Every structure is written in structure tokens, then in C-alpha cells.
Image (tube, rainbow, N blue to C red):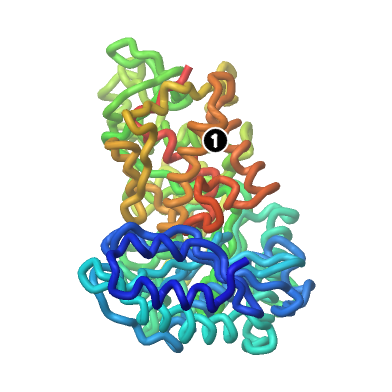
């Protein structure tokens, strides 16, 4: 293996030469305590930054095994070290100047959620940090001495103060691991006891602004559970904690405008992820398979069975294998529900503000005017109990104006000036004043077991094969076809989007065979990740790219919104 002196020699040699001479530094270099691996070198200073890794033996790093020997703890440690690496870049590196991306030094910085990532990995043998560096130049002339500053001055300090256990703030790392253990324990306890969500007393739900996911600092009212729904858990590290539980079944969140209904639901939809200490949502825990449902006019739907909700369309279209390139509000919402059931959700999260009204309810006056046989939609209110009692799928729904749902709900929570109250009994009394048929609307012929087989034709190639890239959080370009993910409200990190793009390519090249259903394929992807890690999916050798694990529900949602999707 080459040494650090070899790298220094080459950088001095190519100083002032054309940018392509940087290709000579690709490879691995022994820096004594660690190895620097330069895995890919950018073609010019305006291209995507070069990819590099630090590889350090556990004999030197010395992180205690008990901090990372379980999956949830391992993720917490890697998250902590990624944030620390980013912090130490800012602390120890004065950015060198140059053209384009010259002097850039960055790692895949997490947001408020703690996700499985490829930025740092740790096991019993080694610790590995993956980062990007913009190799410096003026115009297209190499600044070799500036590159030496990055690799020989800044990087060793960053490595020493991030990847050596003896040099980090051990108490902060241990606190993050203990928080992860408590969150993991709480998730398991909720499931055992038949609860679908928990919001701890003292949680801070509102965010700083519409463009910031950080907690509101001034004026936020801490959450306080109503006594009737308050439960105490004894966490392994934090100890006793009280808060509001939401049991399985149908739960409504009601209240006046601006009183915190949607804020509570938003916190619950993000509760599928763990959050960092200080976020305010550390102990807001929702079933990990909960899916936010909404109307999505204009989306593609490909052979989805929406007959539970929609039948007898005037054009005679088959709703057991419903397809369209331009879904309406009601058909898109029906498809969103059925696609989520297909991949195994047992909790729907719904806000009436983003629903198709005709999909949700049909009042008595309209029923008298429009004959039943002329209305193809069986509204959600007539199916919500069937979903729970026959399929085991719960619903949490914000209902500011859908009072008819009182009759079918199990629990009704009213938000009043950001404080929750249990108004179930009062709402049930009110609903008795109005005649509402609450007979379970079953559908004995309905087959919710998906048989949607993904076809190879879904992944067309151009002259150069398949080219996939992402643009921000909500856009993927497959060759020149846009996959629009802007309505996937539980997609929280652009590195999850990067991962979905990588998964598309992996499916196209390695899995799709015209015999597997779309849900079987997504489950297969998760099986591969579980056994071999996220980096197994990447086509890059060495540095796997900036990837964070998306949930199954966002992967299948992206596939279902792909305009080229073909189902047998």
C-alpha cells in the first residue's frame, strides 16, 4: 500500500497541471493510524466532488462493543459520529478557495431524525467514515498545495477528534445510545400493549417554521396528556415517563382551526422515526409502518384494486385492476390506501385538509338527491370500521368538519389551544342526536392480497443504459422521466431519496423477473439490506454514496408513481 508521503509527493508533482492529473491520486494511502482511501476523483472542479474514506482499525479507535452491538445502538453511534465529523470539519478546516466545488469538504449531515446511513459504519474490526472533497483548482489548474492542506492539515485533526473514542465527549455518545435504547424499548412496549402511538408529556410538537424542522423555541406549549389516556412506561435508562397513548382502532383529532390538530398529526407521522435529543419529539413514537394518506390529483395508478371504495364507473372501467395516467382526488386517495395495505401498513394517518371530500363522506341530503346506484364511490366513513375490524388497520384522522365520523370512532381527542382533551363520551352523545347507519360495511368478495407482478418493461433503457439521478428531496429523474415524490410526507431526508434512486437501478439490474409482485420485490430489497447493509445496493466500489434508509412504504410509493410502471 502507498504511504502518505507518496500522496504528498504526487500532489506536489501535479501542482499547476491540468485538472485531469488529479486522477493519479486515486487509491489507498497508509497514514499510520488510519488509511485514506480516495475512491473516485472528479473530472473537473465543477463536477460532483470526489469520494473518499477514512478506515481505522478498532485496535486504534477503541469504541466499546456494548455501544454498537445491537442494530438500534449501532445506528445511534453512526449518527452521532456523522454529526461530530461535520462539526469538526467546521472547527478544524478553513476552506481553501478555488473554482467550482474547490475546497469543499463534507459528510452526509443528518437532520432531526436518526436514520440508518452509509456515512459512517462501525463493527468489531473497523470504523469507516465516508466523505466528499472538492479537489482544489483555479480555473482547471490544480492547486496541489491546497489539496495538501486538506489531506495533511485539516483531515488528521478531524479524524483524531471524531474517530478515536478517547478523544470524544463520551457522555454525549452514551446519552445518544441510551436514548436509542429507550426509544426501541418504547416501540416494542406499544406494540405489546395494543397502542399505535405515544406522545410523552412535555413534548414540543410545533416546528420553528415552514422551512425548518427544528423545535419552536419561544411560545411552544409543552404537550400534556388527558388523564383518561395517560399511561406510564418505565424506560431502561430514563426511567418512568408518562404521556398520551392512542389505542388501536379509529381515533379522531378534532378542534377549532389553529388549535393544533394538524400539528399533532404531523408529529405522529414523523414519529415513525427516532429523533435526536433536544428535538422535542424524542418520545413521540408511532408504529413504524404508519402511512400518511392524502388525495393526489394527477398521479399515475397502475392496476390497483380500488374496488373496496370505487365501483361501477360510468365508463365501465375495471376498478379491481384500475389504471389511469391522471387520477382524480378520490381514485388517487383510494389507490394510496390500497398500495399501503399491499406493503403491510396497519395504521393510516389522514388529515381532512388534504383529502378528497367525496371520498371521505356523503351526507344524507346528497344521498337523497343522487341515487346510490349512480354513485360509484363508497366513502371512507363506510369502510373505516371494515378496515379495522376485518383487516386490522387502524386510522388516526384530523376531522375539523367531518362530524359524521363521531359514530364510527373509538376515541375522539379535541385540541383546545394546543392542549388535548378526551371528548369521546361527549361526541358519542352528540352523534346519537343524528341518525347515522354504523352497520359494518363489509365486502366479502374483496381480495386485498396483492398479485401485482412488476414487469421488466417498467425499466426502459436508452443508448447508455439506465441513468438515474436525484434533485433534492422530492424528485428523481429516470433517464428523462420525472418521478414526483412531493406528496410523500414521510420522506424526510434527501439521502433517502438518493437511496430510492439506487434501489430503482438495483431492482432493474438484479431483481425484476416478471414473476415477483411489487411488494415481494420491495421486501427482497429489505432482506438484502438486512443481511449485507445499504452499501450492497450501490454501484460505487468503496464509497457507497450518500444513502439513508427509506421505509418500504416510500420505496413502493416511488415505484407506484413511476410513469413507466408496468404491472401484469
User: Between residues 297 and 378, which one lies in front from this camera angle?
Assistant: 297
Q: Is residue 489 above or below residue 156?
A: above
Question: Where the N terminus falls, by quadrant?
Answer: bottom right
Identify the residue shown where x is 58% and y is 24%. Answer: 516
Pointer 1 residue: 341
Q: Percent position (x, y) of residue 390?
A: 63, 32
Count of labels in the image: 1
Label 1 CA crowd tier, 10 Å (few <14, some 14–19, many 20+): many
Q: Percent position (x, y) of residue 434?
A: 42, 41
User: Between residues 356 and 456, which one lies in front from this camera angle?
Assistant: 456
Q: Identify the image quadrant of residue 54.
A: bottom right
Q: Identify the image quadrant of residue 63.
A: bottom right
Q: Percent position (x, y) of residue 531?
A: 70, 47
Q: Is residue 464 above or below residue 51?
A: above
**Viewer can see residue 436:** no
Identify the residue shown where x is 38% and y is 32%. Answer: 465
Q: Decide if residue 563 is on the left or right side of residue 116.
A: left
User: Between residues 100 and 234, which one lies in front from this camera angle?
Assistant: 100
User: Between residues 432 and 129, which one lies in front from this camera angle?
Assistant: 129
Q: Decide if residue 400 is on the left or right side of residue 369.
A: right
Q: Is residue 339 above or below residue 514?
A: below
Q: Quick one: which residue is furthest to the left in this view?
A: 139
Question: Which element is circle 1 on?
Answer: helix
Q: Is residue 5 above or below residue 122?
A: below
Q: Identify the image quadrant of residue 324.
A: top left
Identify the residue shown where x is 47% and y is 54%. Answer: 496
**Viewer can see residue 447:** yes
Q: Percent position (x, y) of residue 517?
A: 56, 25
Identify the residue shown where x is 55% and y is 60%. Answer: 118
Amino acid at each position: 500500500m502507498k504511504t502518505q508521503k507518496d500522496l504528498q509527493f504526487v500532489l506536489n508533482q501535479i501542482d499547476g497541471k491540468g485538472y485531469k492529473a488529479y486522477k493519479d491520486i486515486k487509491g489507498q494511502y497508509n497514514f499510520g493510524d488510519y488509511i485514506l482511501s480516495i475512491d473516485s476523483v472528479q473530472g473537473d472542479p465543477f463536477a460532483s466532488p470526489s469520494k473518499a474514506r477514512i478506515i481505522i482499525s478498532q485496535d486504534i479507535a477503541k469504541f466499546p462493543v456494548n455501544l454498537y452491538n445491537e442494530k438500534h445502538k449501532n445506528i445511534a453511534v453512526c449518527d452521532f459520529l456523522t454529526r461530530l465529523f461535520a462539526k469538526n470539519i467546521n472547527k478544524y478546516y478553513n476552506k481553501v478557495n478555488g473554482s467550482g466545488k474547490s475546497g469543499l469538504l463534507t459528510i452526509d449531515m443528518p437532520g432531526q431524525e436518526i436514520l440508518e446511513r452509509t456515512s459512517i459504519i462501525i463493527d468489531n474490526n473497523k470504523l469507516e467514515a465516508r466523505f466528499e472533497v472538492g479537489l482544489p483548482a483555479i480555473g482547471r489548474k490544480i492547486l496541489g498545495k491546497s489539496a495538501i492542506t486538506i489531506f495533511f492539515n485539516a483531515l488528521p485533526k478531524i479524524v483524531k477528534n471524531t474517530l478515536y473514542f478517547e478523544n470524544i465527549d463520551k457522555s454525549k455518545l452514551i446519552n445518544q445510545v441510551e436514548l436509542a435504547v429507550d426509544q426501541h424499548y418504547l416501540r416494542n412496549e406499544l406494540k405489546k400493549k395494543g397502542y399505535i402511538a405515544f406522545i410523552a408529556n412535555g413534548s414540543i410538537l410545533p416546528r420553528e417554521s415552514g422551512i425548518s424542522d427544528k423545535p419552536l423555541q419561544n411560545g411552544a406549549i409543552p404537550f400534556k396528556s388527558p388523564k383518561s389516556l395517560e399511561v406510564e412506561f418505565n424506560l431502561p435508562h430514563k426511567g418512568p415517563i408518562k404521556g398520551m397513548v392512542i389505542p388501536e382502532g379509529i381515533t379522531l383529532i378534532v378542534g377549532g382551526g389553529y388549535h393544533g390538530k394538524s400539528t399533532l398529526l404531523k408529529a405522529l407521522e414523523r414519529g415513525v422515526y427516532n429523533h435526536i435529543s433536544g428535538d422535542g419529539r424524542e418520545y413521540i413514537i408511532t408504529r413504524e409502518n404508519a402511512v400518511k394518506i392524502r388525495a393526489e390529483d394527477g398521479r399515475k395508478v397502475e392496476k390497483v384494486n380500488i374496488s373496496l371504495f370505487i365501483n361501477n364507473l360510468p365508463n365501465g372501467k375495471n376498478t379491481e385492476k384500475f389504471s389511469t395516467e391522471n387520477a382524480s382526488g378520490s381514485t388517487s386517495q383510494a389507490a394510496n390506501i390500497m398500495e399501503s395495505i399491499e406493503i403491510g401498513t396497519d395504521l393510516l394517518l389522514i388529515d381532512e385538509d388534504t383529502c378528497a371530500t367525496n371520498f371521505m363522506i356523503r351526507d344524507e341530503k346528497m344521498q337523497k338527491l343522487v341515487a346510490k346506484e349512480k354513485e360509484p364511490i363508497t366513502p371512507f366513513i363506510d369502510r373505516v370500521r371494515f378496515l379495522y375490524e376485518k383487516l386490522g388497520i387502524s386510522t388516526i384522522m384530523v376531522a375539523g368538519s367531518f362530524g359524521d365520523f363521531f359514530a364510527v370512532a373509538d376515541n375522539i381527542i379535541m385540541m383546545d389551544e394546543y392542549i388535548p382533551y378526551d371528548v369521546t363520551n361527549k361526541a358519542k352523545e352528540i352523534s346519537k342526536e343524528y341518525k347515522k347507519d354504523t352497520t359494518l360495511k363489509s365486502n366479502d368478495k374483496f381480495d386485498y392480497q396483492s398479485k401485482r407482478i412488476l414487469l421488466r418493461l417498467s425499466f426502459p433503457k436508452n443508448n447508455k443504459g439506465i441513468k438515474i439521478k436525484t434533485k433534492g428531496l422530492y424528485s428523481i429523474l429516470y433517464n428523462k422521466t420525472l418521478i414526483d415524490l412531493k406528496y410523500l410526507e414521510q420522506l424526510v431526508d434527501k439521502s433517502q431519496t438518493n437511496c430510492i434512486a439506487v434501489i430503482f437501478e438495483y431492482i432493474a439490474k438484479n431483481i425484476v423477473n416478471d414473476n415477483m409482485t411489487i411488494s415481494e420485490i420491495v421486501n427482497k430489497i429489505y432482506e438484502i439490506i438486512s443481511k449485507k447493509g445499504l452499501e450492497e445496493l450501490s454501484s460505487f466500489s468503496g464509497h457507497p454514496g450518500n444513502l439513508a434508509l427509506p421505509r418500504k412504504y416510500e420505496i413502493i410509493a416511488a415505484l407506484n408513481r413511476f410513469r413507466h410502471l408496468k404491472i401484469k
